[in-house]
Image (cartoon, rainbow, N blue to C red):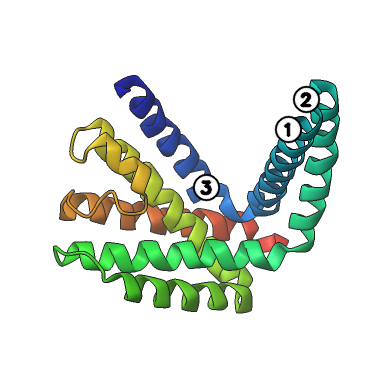
Amino acid sequence: MQLTLSLAALGAILLGVVQCLFGYRIFRVIIGIIGFILGGLLAGYLVYNLTDSQLFGVIAGVVGGLIGLGLMAGLYSVGVFLIGAYFGGVAVSALFALGGGSAPGWLVVVLAIIAGVLAVLFQKLMIVLATSFVGAWWAVSGLAAIAGVIEMQSLRAMPLGLENAGTGWLIGWFVLGLVGVIVQYRATRSHS
């Protein structure tokens, strides 16, 4: 179990850094991959359970994956809303953590919805902010878990892992998030 959680912490660091520094540029790819995986798993699972045929399950998985990819590409705004909403949840959790407490659930939901709507309205800005700070949160949470500052099990409940980690880790998250924003804007300056 400990090895699995350590690997999860290393994965959180790696994926967090990639998302923090390159999130805007790879956002459409990530949405497409998620659509392919979800569509493939759903279709493959359903067909396999109906037919007991692995071959039909695999074929249905590939077809379902391609349909899922197409749907997610067509529902790009939903992906933008979701990453913005996640960013809103992370931001309000971090602000309350700085004060030594936890954000009320209703406030997290309200600010997540507001951030999601803002992400749809101001896509580039919000995708850069969201991917930078959410990626930084994952990276710093993974580092804090490996350092023993937070329990490894709290990685399962992200974005809630750093609430008890202390101000230094939250400042590290904020600084890495700002670095991500700067790197992403410099890299995408001529692509917008």
Residue, disc 1 = 49
Considering the image in quadrants, where does the N terminus appear? top left
Q: Residue 52 falls in which quadrant of the image? A: top right
Q: Is residue 166 above or below residue 150?
A: below
Categorize mark 3 by other alpha carbons within 10 Å: few (<14), some (14-19), many (20+). Answer: many
- Three-letter amino acid code at disc 1? Asn
Q: Residue drawn 25% across and 50% down? A: 162
In the displayed structure image, the side of residue 171 where residue 34 appears, left or right: right
Give the residue drawn at x 39%, y 46%. 138
Whether residue 165 is visible, yes or no, is yes
Residue 189 image offset from top left, x and y in percent: 64, 62
For label 2, the crowd category at 10 Å Cα-Cα, with few meaning under 14, some 14 to 19 and many 20 or more, is few
**Which amino acid, mark 3?**
Gln
Q: Quadrant of residue 41?
A: top right
Q: Quick one: label 3 or label 1, which is nearer the N terminus?
A: 3
Q: From where the camera sits, is residue 182 visible? A: no
Q: Are marks 1 and 2 in contact (CB under 8 Å)?
A: yes
Which mark is drawn over residue 52? Answer: 2
Please tell me whether mark 1 sits on a helix, a strand or a loop: helix
Q: Position of residue 106 (x, y in %)?
A: 34, 75
Residue 108 percent across, percent down from the top left: 36, 70
Position of 3 with respect to 69 (left or right) is left
| Secondary structure beneath label 2 | loop
